[in-house]
Image (cartoon, rainbow, N blue to C red):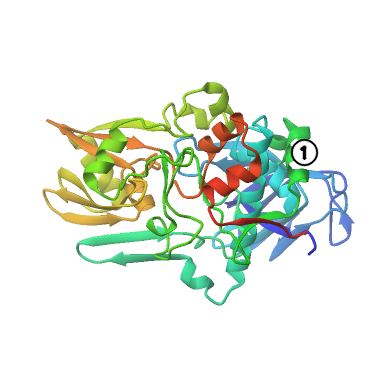
Amino acid sequence: MKEPVVRVGILSEEQIRFVLGESYRIDGQPVSGEQSLVWKSGKILWNGELHDSLLFETDDKDATFTIRDVVIGVNFHWERKENQRFQGNLSFIVEGESVTAINIVAIEDYLSSVIASEMSSSASLALLEAHAVISRSWLLAQIERGKSPQAEAHKASFVETEDRHIRWYDREDHQNFDVCADDHCQRYQGVSRAFENIDRVKQAIAATRGQVLQYEGEICDARFSKCCGGIVEEFENCWEDVPVPYLVRLRDAERGEELPDLTQEQEAVAWIAARPEAFCNTRDPKILSQALNSYDQETQDFYRWKLRYSTQELSDLIQRRSGIDFGEILSLTPLKRGASGRIVELKITGSKKTKIIGKELEIRKILSESHLYSSAFYVEKEQDAFVLHGAGWGHGVGLCQIGAAVMGEKGYVYDSILLHYYPGAMIKKLY
């Protein structure tokens, strides 16, 4: 198998500014330096002419281009803009009333940036190698699934009735490229991230070149999150109602540790209220700095956290984020929890309306200005306030990045880390 290329959507804006290196060309003609284009009447206006699409190519593997004001952390509390530099070819297409920039790049070069963007490139070699394998696996699995006749069924689904709003999200946003560059898919923030510790990144990529996780002959959809909170969640509680045999509940600890039933409310509350031993139960700044970039560390608590809303704040927030006027919020009641204690269905009771919300990401969106750290929480009602006591950060499915960082520091090698989080999977070299 030849090394694949990947089409990565970088950003979509009405106007985009970018800088091309010396070796770029378009339609065989050289072009370089500062550039600007804008959407106009369903076309791309560049150099005084309208185009349906544009493709800037290079044969120089080391050539780079820079896109200005790329938004990272879209809709999250760390959202900001950066100038980012990329390798490979650069394409522009029209999507709606915006122009979308797409980086066309070899998968191994793509991965060099991903593993340095998802975490610190100074992380342990075992962690970088493990993440290279799962990022490669996840990407190739998404590309293959996008080609399948059942692709439309995997995008998203929702139930909307008078008393229920249940929705899950997957790849519904990306029809014209393989993956986006932000947290919706995998963080991909250009070559400048990888170059901070380029030798370590290249070593991790080279050591695992072409390696993927497979289960029964198929490439694994290797999901991952920042912090599982002590127990890894099951796939079907976050996305499609289909069990995935290698994305199952497991204790993020040495084998033999007790696995409580957190689908039961009483056990879930007791688990979240405590700080049980787990790989991801760490406050060690050295380890956290491996798994978390500087802006991720603006959040102080990962394993356990607490958030307080006054009743008025919560009522206003839920109306603004859901578009539903519940009136004054009277209670938040978990109706269904997953294996990690993450709430899958939450009943919101207000003075004007009561409705059941799900799945986990929809709950996190409605209960925060960006995204709540996770849906693994219980509610403590004060006289005029709601206090959310929570566990973990993210959906909690698959590899737990903080837990994997701890495993790397404890001396686990990358294949042991992978087979801990994806039981039953095998590592196979594709190219």
The outermost residue toward the top is: 285
Q: Position of residue 428 (x, y in %)?
A: 70, 57
Q: Amino acid at mark 1?
A: Gln
Can residue 33 be seen at all in this image of the molecule? no
What residue does disc 1 label? 203
**Left or right of 31 in this view: 80:** left
The quadrant in which residue 33 appears is top right
Q: Position of residue 412 (x, y in %)?
A: 61, 36
**Left or right of 290 in this view: 48:** right
Q: Nearer the viewer, residue 19 or 340?
A: 340
Image quadrant containing the N terminus:
bottom right
**Left or right of 243 in this view: 341:** left
Residue found at x 82% / y 43%: 21
Q: Is residue 96 above or below residue 416?
A: below
Q: Nearer the viewer, residue 192 or 228?
A: 228
Counting other residues with Cα less than 10 Å from the Cα at mark 1, is it few (<14), some (14-19), or many (20 or more)?
some
The outermost residue toward the front is: 256
The quadrant in which residue 370 appears is top left
Q: Callout 1: helix, strand or loop?
A: helix
**Left or right of 180 in this view: 249:** left
Q: Position of residue 214 (x, y in %)?
A: 62, 60
Image quadrant containing the C terminus:
bottom right
